[in-house]
Amino acid sequence: MKTAKKILQGACGFVLILLLWQAAASAHVFNASLFPTPLQTWQALAELITQNNLYLQIGASMTRYLIGYVIAAVLAVILGLLHGYYAGSWNYVNPLVQFLRPISPIAWMPFIVLWFGIGDIPAEVVIFIAAFFPILLSTVSAVRHIDPVYLKVASNFSFGTLKTITSIVFPAAFPQIMDGFRMACGTAWIFLVAGEMVGAQSGLGFLIVDARNNLRVDVLAATIVVIGVLGLAIDLFMHYLEDLVRKRWGLGIAKTSR
Amino acid sequence: MSYIEIQDVSKSYASGEESHTILSHISLSIEKGEFVCLLGPSGCGKTTLMNLVAGFEKADAGSITIHGEPVNGPKKDYVTIFQNYGLLPWLTVEKNVMLGLSDEKLTRKEKQERAEQYLREVGLYESRGLRPGELSGGMQQRVAIARALAVHPEILFMDEPFAALDALTRMRLQDDMLKLSREEKKTILFVTHDIEEAVFLADRIVILKENPGEIRKIVKVPLGKERDRTWDEFQYLRDHILRLFEAGVPDRTEYYI
């Protein structure tokens, strides 16, 4: 009942934007050839699916997304656990991280292309950069905020450092790390398209560039809708995982809005 | 030399510019198998004293030895039970109890049997597959007790273990604790601010005073290991200690039954 109401409430915004979109198209605010109607966009979407192998493009994007994201997650969690556990070391690293973090992954693009060439790698590297910092920061903070009683228990049972980190610190911090995973998923998705606009021959970013080059505004709009829907699906999925983790850890449902 | 020897131990914490003395020149001997309660108002340093003996913190001055060996850090032979249980919420009750057994030379099955044995002892065998979050506070503390006993420690350190529980559950766990100390013959150092709890459980009560933390008085509880809260002696001893607290000045009369 509550979920149904929530979905209904959420749908209101979509209906409103659709109405505004149609109104703007009907009122010819912009030249009709530059402003696709919802119907044209829908038809372009059908065309993408039937003629342009949309699923393959999504698959290509998702593969790059996963490669960049997983490498970032593994590295960021390992570094985050170490720097969170050895609190002193973070003082050396934190300023550097705060310096690098605000630099848009896109700013690195020319270097990435010079060093790694074009193709799959630029997108993967951009996604890596985008996902790395949120996960690193949330892991460090998660480790620093775990209940000290867990560490007392570990030392009482004479756990070594490695065992303490892997079997006490990591699971204790995991629900909060999961929160970082979710945020990083969103950030990485934002930069996926930008990463694919450079030299990729497939994927959603490629579709955007291709539609622009062919002046197919309807395809452009349809691709944007696809990117949004997938982003929403990823976020819902991550929320679902987060709730699963919190439930298993005996914590309440996350208070983050969705 | 006694089993646990605390000699002239002091501890202070720096807060900003000032340093605050938590414990000042504490000396105390505890015999093997003895049940000693550290009793005092909050801020008297009773938990700090226990942390020092358990090896979680280091004293600024003085020495602490167990079995003649200086305390250098926590050990599996001396297990601490915390007020907020210290159970790992992501593990099942059974896995929690097996936590301390991981580096013992036992097969997986033997570890499991050991855990089950102690879960039975605290009456939670049926709950072994649940997670701590699914249990009441009293049950969680029972799991923590089972986890401590499973490693066969010589000493149990208990830091206000029942303070967060409701009155009825607390009494039930105190009953269990008394039975346990009778049967398991562990040396137990038990921190509490509850006078009745101390009188009910302890062989000896060490009453601490605050600012700085010093031993005000050590009271023997000659009630044996079978106790009843309704006994006259029990009530008398409780009132005696209560008066010690209220008066704030040392009572010169020694207490004997």
Image (cartoon, rainbow, N blue to C red):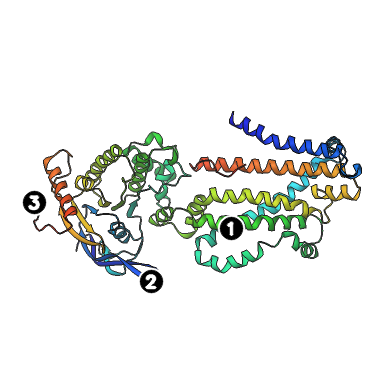
Q: Mark 3 or mark 2, which is nearer the start of the sequence? A: 2
Identity of the residue drawn at 53% across and 54% down: A142
Q: Which chain does tag 1 point to?
A: A
Residue B171 placement, left or right of A94: left
**A179 or B131: nearer the viewer:** A179
Q: In which quarter of the image is the N terminus of chain A?
A: top right
Q: Mark 1 points at which residue?
A: A137
SS at circle 1: helix
Residue B174 placement, left or right of B98: left
Badge nearest the viewer, 2 or 1: 2
Which disc number belongs to residue B17?
A: 2
On the image, the x and y values in percent for residue A28 come to: 88, 40
On the image, the x and y values in percent for residue B103 come to: 42, 53
On the image, the x and y values in percent for residue B123 come to: 33, 36
Q: How far is disc 2 from disc 1 in space, using C-alphas?
A: 32 Å
Tally of marks? 3
Amino acid at pointer 3: Tyr
Amino acid at pointer 1: Leu
Q: How crowded is mark 1: few (under 14 residues within 10 Å), some or many (20 or more)?
A: many
Q: In which quarter of the image is residue B108?
A: top left
Identity of the residue drawn at 38% across and 55% down: A156
Q: Mark 3 points at which residue?
A: B256
Q: In which quarter of the image is the C terminus of chain A?
A: top right
On the image, the x and y values in percent for residue A215 come to: 91, 47
Q: How crowded is mark 3: few (under 14 residues within 10 Å), some or many (20 or more)?
A: few
Q: Are marks 2 and 3 in contact (CB under 8 Å)?
A: no
Q: How far is disc 1 from disc 3 in space, using C-alphas?
A: 62 Å
Amino acid at pointer 2: Glu
Q: In which quarter of the image is residue B113?
A: top left
The answer to whether marks 2 and 3 sit on the same chain is yes
SS at circle 2: loop
Residue A44 placement, left or right of A130: right
